[in-house]
Structures are given as structure tokens and as C-alpha cells.
């Protein structure tokens, strides 16, 4: 069984190494693409501002572009705040459900101990044996 485990761990490590190098390569290409898109975006902003400067004064054109992006930034921040509040509500509901389940489990266990103490002892021994058999062996166990 030990050689099979060594073989499987070697295969897993090989796959992980290949996957990591692939993601590094993809990350590099994504970074290059993001830089090129950002450059194109900046040139589009400059072109839009130059066009507005022909129609209006340069000061009004620059102020209009700044105001437009300020409003867009505020909209994004508001959307982020709404999503964070929703995530907090979902996490609180999950926490409440978990506490309710834990309380129900404790009440059930207490009821079982009071009504059928012999069965409760048997369940505790079986659970302890199961946990003892399924835990990982360490060097100090040998």
C-alpha cells in the first residue's frame, strides 16, 4: 500500500506542477492583455477629451470627463456596499442555522442520555471507536 501511495502522490505532484506552470503562463498573458487594454482605454479617454475640447472649452471637457468617471466610481462603490451587506446577511443566516442545528443536536443528545443512558453510552463508544480508527497515524504513534 505504501508504494501505491507514493506513486499516487508523485502523480498528484506532477499534475500540480504542470497546473501551476500553466496558470503562471496564463497569468503572464492576462497581465499583458490587461496592460494593452488599459493603454487602449487611456487613449480612448484622451481622444474623447480632445473631441469634447473641440466642441466645448478644454476646461469644460476635462471637467465633464472627470465628473462622468466620478459618478461611475460612486455607482461601483454603492454596488459593492450592497453586495457586501447581502453577503453579511447570508453569513448571519448560515451562522444562525448552524447554531440552531447545534442546539437541536445537544437537546437530542441530552434527551437520549436521560431516557436511554445505555444506548447513549453505546453510541458514544461507537463514535469514539470510529474516530479512533479513522484518524491519521503520526510518527509518534508507531
Image: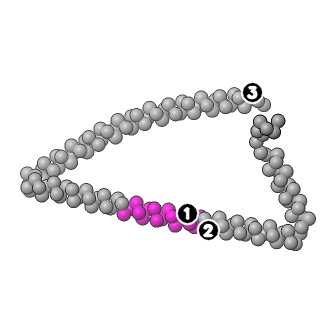
Magenta segment? 78-94
Spatial CA span between label 2 and label 1? 9 Å
Pinpoint residue 4: horizontal percent, then vertical percent.
74, 29
- Asked if marks 3 and 1 touch (Cβ < 8 Å), the reply is no
Q: CA distance from mark 3 to mark 1?
A: 44 Å
Residue 140 screen position, x and y as percent: 79, 38
Q: Residue pushed farthest front?
A: 140
The chief SS type of the magenta part is helix
Which residue matches tag 3?
A: 3
Question: On the rendered structure, is 33 left or right of 46?
Answer: right
Q: CA distance from mark 2 to mark 3?
A: 46 Å
Residue 97 against residue 27 in the figure, above or below: below
Residue 97 shown in magenta: no
The residue under the point 89% across, 69% down is 116
Q: Residue at x 18, y 46 (%)?
A: 46
The picture quadrant where one finds residue 78 is: bottom left
Q: Which residue is mark 2?
A: 96
Quadrant position of the C terminus in the picture: top right
Query: Residue at (21%, 59%) from the top-left corner?
Result: 67
> Does residue 118 appear left or right of residue 61 in this picture?
right
Query: Dot 1 corresponds to which residue?
Result: 91
Q: What residue lies at 25% left-to-right and 41% top-to-bottom?
A: 40
Q: Residues within 10 Å of mark 3 (few under 14, many from 20)?
A: few
Q: Dividing the image into 4 quarters, which one contains the N terminus? A: top right
Q: Which one is earlier in the sequence, the residue at label 2 or at label 3?
A: 3
Q: In which quadrant of the rendered view does residue 75 lie?
A: bottom left
Neighbours of disc 2 within 10 Å: few (<14), some (14-19), many (20+): few
Mark 3 falls on what kind of element? helix
Q: Position of residue 32 (x, y in %)?
A: 35, 35
Q: Dot 1: few (<14), some (14–19), or many (≥20) neighbours within 10 Å?
A: few
Amino acid at each position: 500500500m505504501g508504494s501505491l501511495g507514493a506513486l499516487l502522490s508523485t502523480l498528484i505532484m506532477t499534475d500540480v506542477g504542470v497546473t501551476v506552470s500553466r496558470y503562471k503562463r496564463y497569468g503572464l498573458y492576462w497581465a499583458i492583455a490587461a496592460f494593452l487594454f488599459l493603454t487602449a482605454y487611456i487613449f480612448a479617454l484622451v481622444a474623447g477629451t480632445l473631441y469634447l475640447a473641440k466642441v466645448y472649452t478644454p476646461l469644460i471637457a476635462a471637467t465633464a470627463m472627470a465628473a462622468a468617471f466620478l459618478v461611475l466610481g460612486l455607482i461601483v462603490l454603492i454596488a459593492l456596499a450592497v453586495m457586501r451587506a447581502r453577503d453579511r446577511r447570508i453569513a448571519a443566516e448560515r451562522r444562525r442555522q448552524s447554531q440552531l442545528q447545534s442546539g437541536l443536536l445537544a437537546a437530542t443528545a441530552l434527551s437520549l442520555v436521560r431516557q436511554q443512558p445505555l444506548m447513549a453510552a453505546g453510541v458514544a463508544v461507537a463514535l469514539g471507536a470510529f474516530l479512533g480508527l479513522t484518524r491519521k497515524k503520526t510518527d509518534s504513534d508507531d
